[in-house]
């Protein structure tokens, strides 16, 4: 921030808030500042994601740390006149704690942030991501300077190994060890690759880091290049992330202009530069060998390992692949030391983890918590509990490859090993919460549908096996399942896990196995009773009218699109089950609670 200003208005400029006109809000704020001749005293700064997406767009006023939520362009004038000019907070825009029913005047005391520790997200919401000077002011590029002027590559690698940082892209492989293997692999040319191909449903961790703090990734890639002996970096990012791409391009250009990328960085003999490569949104390209094949111009398919990319990767050369969040941790570890980072988290899972909280939860958003934080703390304290007072049912961690964890897992400390033991996985950090109205058989079917669609089709276990799994689940949700289907689901899932070529196929049965483990009774109800306990599977639903409550107002009959409801005025009506399409229009129009789902 430019210290000449007396006040700063930080406006969320992430994709989520942009979709709610935060860019228009910024324009209005600047317009009203100019009208009041305050443009030289108050600065409007576009930042990255604050994380609290449920309450966006957000405006944070500094230095008094006032936190305004759900701000619209129409609120801009009031913020300038009341807060900036008169020094009075706009009460209606302040966050109201849903439990204590009281106004929270700054973010430090908000439940959403209270248990968070932001390392990878340290700059998101604090700096203008398009201004390299703001990044430098928060110790930016100090880590790469320290590495190339004070440390040998092996010393940096040892620091990374000592930190205990594990890859945040899903598998959790030790980062320092991966760097060391790549550094020792012989090759006249080596590459650093950043995996920004984020494809999990409901996940937006990497996108938000690149939108809010692209320089941290640029700096970390340069550090990695120094360690492994690479002078070339490649960022593989899906083309559906236009804002992240724009800010990455700006960051790379700015770093090049002041000598932090390119030849002879900081007057040393170290050369390193970065290019951006675009993906077409194939989920399988999040797997490192498929990603590399795509960058080479081939079809995005996984390849057999070994050899691993660290030995033979991009163009057959030693290649180090880490995802965005992993890289975002690196500069902090170098600046603050491995011992500092190592003290955070659990014995085998050090540091923090970024999660995208989504689904049936009050505080949808981006969070970062120390490893070892429980699911209960994340869902009910940070996440604010389940929407509309509904009962918690399950949480899907790890995206389509993860499992559905139940109420008995709520006190499970989150780390790589605990989630795997529970039948799920960390994945890249997607966390989708479900409530009592969700059908777990349908949830498993949804994720299998996604996996079948996104499979590269190279190996039969994934190409054929997952299709068969989906067909069995589809049969069950349509009321045509048999009890032997349950054993078939289990056996086929285990075969796929043991024989699929890559991580996508090997983990794809997790939603099936975890829902069978946690919600076996729901499968039985679908098969034996031809009933969906949650009322979500249309073919197993029956809309019926309680004659004792029906007054014959005809509202349901008049709004039925297929004329499935008959009856005389002022007399109980009936529904023809053969004609009913289960659209729910009748329930919406009935004012007497006469229609129910069996």
Image: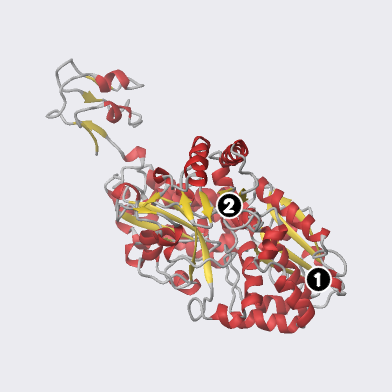
Q: Is residue 185 above or below residue 530?
A: below
Residue 157, located in which quarter of the rendered image? bottom right
Residue position marked by numbered label 1 in the rendering: 230
Q: Is residue 553 above or below residue 422?
A: above
Q: Secondary structure at mark 2?
A: strand
The percent position of residue 147, horizontal first and vertical second, equals 74, 77
Query: Which residue occupies the extreme left position in the image?
Result: 548
**Side of 487 where 182 appears, left or right:** right
**Side of 192 where 461 appears, left or right:** left
Q: Secondary structure at mark 1?
A: loop
Quarter of the figure with the N terminus:
bottom right
**Front residue of 96 and 305:** 96
The percent position of residue 59, horizontal first and vertical second, equals 52, 48
* Precedes in sequence: disc 2 or disc 1: 2
The percent position of residue 248, horizontal first and vertical second, equals 71, 54
**Front residue of 231 and 567:** 231
**Side of 447 where 588 appears, left or right:** left
Real-space CA distance between mark 2 and mark 1, rounded to the nearest whole angstrom: 40 Å
């Amino acid at each position: 921030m430019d210290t000449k200003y007396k006040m700063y208005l930080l406006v969320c400029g992430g994709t989520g808030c942009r979709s709610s006109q935060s860019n228009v809000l910024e324009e209005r704020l600047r317009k009203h500042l100019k009208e009041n001749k305050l443009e030289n005293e108050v600065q409007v700064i576009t930042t990255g994601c604050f994380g609290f997406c449920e309450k966006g767009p957000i405006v944070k006023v500094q230095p008094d740390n006032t936190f305004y939520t759900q701000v619209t362009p129409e609120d801009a004038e009031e913020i300038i006149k009341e807060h900036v000019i008169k020094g009075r907070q706009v009460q209606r825009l302040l966050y109201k704690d849903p439990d204590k029913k009281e106004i929270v005047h700054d973010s430090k005391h908000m439940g959403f942030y209270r248990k968070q520790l932001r390392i990878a997200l340290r700059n998101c919401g604090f700096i203008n991501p398009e201004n390299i000077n703001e990044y430098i002011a928060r110790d930016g590029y100090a880590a790469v300077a320290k590495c190339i002027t004070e440390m040998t590559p092996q010393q940096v690698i040892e620091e990374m190994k000592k930190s205990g940082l594990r890859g945040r892209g899903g598998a959790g492989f030790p980062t320092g060890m991966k760097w060391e293997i790549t550094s020792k692999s012989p090759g006249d040319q080596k590459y650093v690759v950043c995996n920004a191909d984020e494809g999990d449903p409901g996940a937006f961790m990497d996108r938000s880091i690149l939108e809010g703090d692209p320089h941290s990734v640029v700096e970390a890639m340069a550090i990695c290049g120094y360690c492994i002996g690479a002078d070339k970096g490649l960022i593989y990012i899906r083309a559906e992330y236009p804002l992240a791409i724009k800010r990455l391009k700006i960051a790379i250009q700015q770093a090049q202009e002041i000598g932090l990328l390119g030849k002879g960085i900081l007057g040393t003999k170290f050369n390193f530069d970065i290019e951006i490569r675009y993906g077409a949104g194939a989920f399988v390209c999040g797997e490192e060998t498929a990603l590399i094949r795509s960058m080479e111009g081939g079809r995005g398919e996984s390849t057999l390992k070994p050899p691993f990319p660290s030995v033979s990767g991009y163009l057959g050369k030693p290649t180090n692949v880490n995802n965005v969040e992993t890289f975002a941790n690196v500069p902090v570890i170098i600046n603050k030391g491995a011992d500092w980072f190592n003290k955070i988290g659990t014995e085998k899972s050090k540091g923090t983890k970024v999660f995208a909280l989504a689904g049936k939860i009050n505080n949808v958003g981006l969070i970062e918590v120390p490893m070892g934080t429980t699911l209960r703390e994340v869902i009910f304290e940070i996440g604010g509990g389940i929407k509309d007072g509904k009962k918690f049912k399950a949480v899907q961690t790890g995206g389509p490859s993860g499992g559905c964890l139940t109420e008995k897992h709520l006190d499970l400390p989150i780390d790589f090993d605990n989630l795997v033991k529970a039948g799920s996985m960390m994945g890249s950090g997607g966390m989708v919460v479900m409530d009592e109205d969700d059908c777990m058989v349908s949830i498993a079917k949804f994720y299998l549908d996604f996996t079948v669609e996104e499979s590269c089709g190279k190996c039969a276990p994934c190409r054929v096996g997952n299709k068969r799994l989906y067909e069995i689940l589809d049969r069950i949700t349509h009321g045509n399942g048999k009890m032997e289907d349950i054993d078939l689901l289990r056996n086929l899932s285990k075969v796929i896990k043991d024989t699929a070529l890559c991580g996508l196929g090997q983990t794809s049965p997790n939603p099936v196995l975890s829902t069978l483990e946690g919600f076996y009774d729901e499968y039985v109800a679908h098969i034996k009773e031809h009933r969906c306990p949650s009322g979500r599977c249309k073919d197993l639903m029956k809309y019926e009218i309680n004659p004792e409550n029906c007054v014959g107002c005809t509202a349901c009959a008049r709004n039925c699109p297929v004329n499935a409801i008959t009856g005389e005025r002022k007399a109980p009506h009936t529904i023809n089950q053969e004609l009913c399409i289960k659209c729910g229009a009748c329930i919406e129009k009935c004012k007497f609670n006469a229609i129910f789902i069996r």
